Image (cartoon, grey):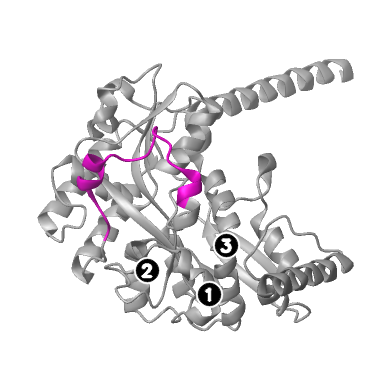
Amino acid sequence: MKKVLSAITTAVIAAVLLSVGISAQVTVDDESYYAAFRDKGITLNVYNWGEYISDGTDGSLDIIEEFENISGITVNYTLFDTNEDMYAKLAHGGSQYDIIIPSDYMIARLIDEDMLEKIDYNNIPNIKYIDDKYRYTDFDPNAEYSVPYTWGMVGLVYNTKYVTAEEASSWDVLWNEKFKGKVLMFGNSRDAFAIALKKLGYSLNTENLDEITEASEALTAQKEVNQAYAMDQTFDKMANENAYAAPYYAGDCLTMMERNSDLAFSYPKEGVNRFIDSICIPKGTQNKQAAEAFINFLCETEVAVANCEYISYFTPHTVAAEQLGVDERIYPSDEVISNSETFVMLGDEANALMEDLWLKIRSTSSFDSTIFPLAIIIILALVIFVILYVVRKRKKSKIDY
């Protein structure tokens, strides 16, 4: 009887949604939960990484559009490049955001600085699908402030036409003079320092100031071969063969590999970063329940499957993980996982030193092989323009004479 009533209820809600011109492509556990927000004029401001949600391209599910259709909530969706950029925006009056998706160590910092709201799990029934090992973590031990979105690993994407598997097995490749002007480095401090620290044999969470300084010296030396500090730009640079090797997040590397069949992926032997990105609600939001509804929607099984199919990251959603399986090209072995580290929040002194040294590293431009030829073309064009102008001027003067 309960199943019959449930079916009738679902049919009625679907009919209502269709009557107001709404068509949902996804099946959710409880449509009435989202319908309760309709006609309330709510707008949610969501702040996320680039290329980090299924958006309707290439036949994928448009998650934002589907959420708007089913809930009547309008979503303003904006992007950030790094955790540090997101933090700076939030710390300087970014309380207008209702949803953010930071990484583990940044969540710890936001909790420490009282910048996040506690989540009411009564409003997130789909939390039942999220694996506890990703919920109860060092950065949020009581799972009060964050809901896991994805997890993943940092590795190296490289072009097999120019870089061998042996060369790609070590972070040393990013310092190799052979590839001058053809390698990239992360555009954020924590990831870049992690690579240098691992290359030197140190923990990526070290608070030893001498080790951090030594890592900064390594990164300064790396500038001699580095083409550019890149984040989302890595996609095009690697796919178009403007660069031959770059560190990046495994899921995104798979996307690049699909664009260029000569690209491959490795986990350097010195060790890598293992991360969890989670959904949080910034302190001061005026739309907390609606934000929790958005989080619940992201935890719908069909949504989680479609999302991870598109972004290629690993999911903490137990049912979705079973349906998706693993891609052997990027899925880490037990050995790789045991040789990985998760970021933790650094102490004030270590964090301040790292940020200060990073600013000094970035204060002078790195080599960018794509900019130099463009500058030459512009200069030549200007020279030709001036010459033509002078020639025409002289001809005109002779005619007038």
Element carrying mark 2: helix
Task: Give SS at disc 1.
Answer: loop
Q: Would you identify the image quadrant in which residue 217 lies?
A: top left
> 320 and 285: which one is in front?
320
Q: Nearer the viewer, residue 331 or 108?
A: 331
Mark 1–mark 2 distance (CA, rounded to whole Å): 19 Å
Mark 1 vs mark 2: which is more N-terminal? Answer: 2
Q: Using the image, determine if residue 213 lies above or below residue 227.
A: below
Residue under label 3, please give it: 300
Tell me which label, 2 or 3, sits earlier in the chain.
2
Between the C-alphas of marks 3 and 1, the distance is 10 Å
Q: Residues within 10 Å of mark 2 (few under 14, many from 20)?
A: many
Q: Nearer the viewer, mark 1 or mark 2?
A: 1
* Mark 2 → mark 3, Cα distance in angstroms: 23 Å
Res 16 quadrant in image = bottom right
Residue where numbered disc 1 is placed: 124
Quadrant where the C terminus sits is: top right
Q: In the image, what residue occupies the spot 46% across and 47% down? A: 313
| Residue 363 makes an appearance in the image | no
Q: Of the residues under marks 3 and 1, which one precedes in the sequence?
A: 1
Residue range in magenta is 321-343
Against 44, residue 208 (above or below) is above
- Locate residue 268, reporting x and y percent: 25, 35
Is the Cβ of the residue at disc 3 closer than 8 Å to that at disc 1?
A: no
Q: Where residue 218 sits: x, y (%)?
A: 20, 41
Query: Type of residue at label 1?
Result: Ile
Three-letter code, disc 2: Ile
Image quadrant holding the N terminus, namely bottom right
Q: Is residue 316 magenta?
A: no
**In this view of the protein, which residue sits in the foreground, 372 or 29?**
29
Q: Which residue is mark 2?
A: 107
